Amino acid sequence: MAALAWLLIPLVAAIGAGLWGSWANRTRRARGDGPELDGYERFREAMEKSRT
């Protein structure tokens, strides 16, 4: 019975990690790449201005 208890610990940890991963990833899909791409566009424009 003790061996089954030790096997239950990684199983519960794996289920918890899967739930946390799916919860943490839910906001990433909703946000998208908009803010990062906007920042890159501003950076690129600033670099082009400094050359001329």
Image: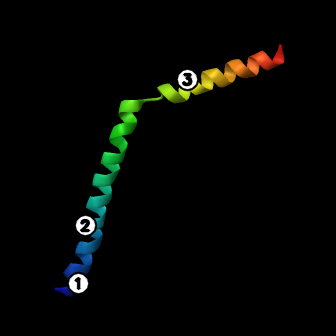
Residue at disc 2, secondary structure: helix
In the displayed structure, 44 sits above or below 11; it is above
In the displayed structure, 7 sits above or below 42; it is below
Residue identified by numbered label 1: 3
> How far is mark 1 from mark 3, CA to CA?
54 Å
Q: For the residue carrying disc 1, how many other residues have a C-alpha within 10 Å: few (<14), some (14-19), or many (20+)?
A: few
Mark toward the viewer: 3 or 2: 3
Left/right placement of residue 1 relative to residue 46 reads: left
| Dot placed on the residue nearer the N-terminal end, 1 or 2 | 1
Seen at 80% across and 19% down, the residue is 50
| Dot placed on the residue nearer the N-terminal end, 1 or 3 | 1
Who is closer to the viewer here, 50 or 37? 50
Who is closer to the viewer here, 6 or 47? 47
Seen at 28% across and 60% down, the residue is 16
Quarter holding the N terminus is bottom left
Q: Point out which mark residue 12 bears.
A: 2
The furthest residue to the top: 52
Quarter holding the C terminus is top right
Give the color scheme: rainbow, by chain, secondary structure or one colour.
rainbow
Seen at 75% across and 17% down, the residue is 48
Q: For the residue carrying disc 2, how many other residues have a C-alpha within 10 Å: few (<14), some (14-19), or many (20+)?
A: few
Left/right placement of residue 29 relative to residue 45 reads: left
Mark toward the viewer: 1 or 2: 2
The picture places residue 51, in percent across and down from the top left corner, at: 82, 18
Which quadrant holds residue 25? top left
Q: For the residue carrying disc 3, how many other residues have a C-alpha within 10 Å: few (<14), some (14-19), or many (20+)?
A: few
Residue kind at label 3, given as amino acid type: Asp
Mark toward the viewer: 1 or 3: 3
Residue kind at label 1, given as amino acid type: Ala
